[in-house]
Image (cartoon, grey):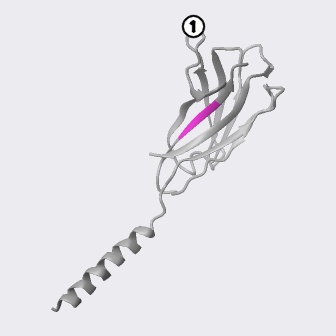
Amino acid sequence: MTASAVAMTVFIAAAMLIMASCEHKPVMSHARFVHLPAGGWQRTLPLTFTPEYDDSTRTYDIALAVRHDNSYRYRNLSLVVDIIAADSTVSRHQMDLSLADEYGNWTGGGFGSLYQDKVTVVSGATPTSASSVVVWQAMQGCDTLCGLVNVGIITSPK
């Protein structure tokens, strides 16, 4: 085999490897957030999310994320999260997020006056086991909750 034939063979093999790697779409995390009204989040108004899945053969973690500002009056946040499967079965989760420590310091990440906390609600979800997520605020004695800016879900591949 001549040097040019070897070079051509190596070039074709490299091109085939590059093209094969381009065929696979990466599986990524997806986030969906709802902006809450400045007047507060009413207890009777649930937030509904549809998780986004890139690959139906994989499993995913679904996390709940909350963004709040300095006007939030409480250390914690009580929520009810309903995971609705494709067959309409509901799995209910009581979530109690701690947003501040015992000294009143916000625990979430962020900058300025906006902080974000997140907690995993479901691990190992599939498109059929979690086709919809419904979130309710469940703070005792609080019909309208002020100080929250956004609530959302983050769907991440395992």
Q: Main secondary structure of the magenta part?
A: strand
Answer whether residue 37 is magenta in the image. Answer: no
Q: Around disc 1, counting alpha carbons within 10 Å, would you say few (fewer than 14), some (14 to 19), or many (20 or more)?
A: few
- Give the residue type that dot 1 points to: Tyr
Q: Is label 1 in a helix, a strand or a loop? A: loop
Residue 86 image offset from top left, x and y in percent: 63, 50
Residue 75 image offset from top left, x and y in percent: 63, 14
Answer whether residue 65 is magenta in the image. Answer: yes
Is 148 displayed left or right of 25 in the figure?
A: right
Image quadrant containing the N terminus: bottom left
- Taking the spot 44% from the left edge, 69% from the top edge, the residue there is 22
- State the residue lying farthest toward the right: 39
Q: Nearer the viewer, residue 105 or 144?
A: 105
Query: Which residue, given by chain and number where applicable, does mark 1 sit on?
Result: 103
Vertical placement of residue 70 versus 82, above or below: above
Q: Which residues are magenta?
A: 62-66
- Taking the spot 69% from the left edge, 37% from the top edge, the residue there is 134
Vertical placement of residue 14 versus 101, above or below: below
Residue 114 image offset from top left, x and y in percent: 65, 27
Residue 40 image offset from top left, x and y in percent: 80, 26
- Taking the spot 17% from the left edge, 92% from the top edge, the residue there is 2
| Rendering quarter of residue 31 | top right
| Rendering quarter of residue 119 | top right
Is 127 displayed left or right of 35 in the figure?
A: left
Image quadrant containing the C terminus: top left
| Rendering quarter of residue 32 | top right
Vertical placement of residue 9 versus 41, above or below: below
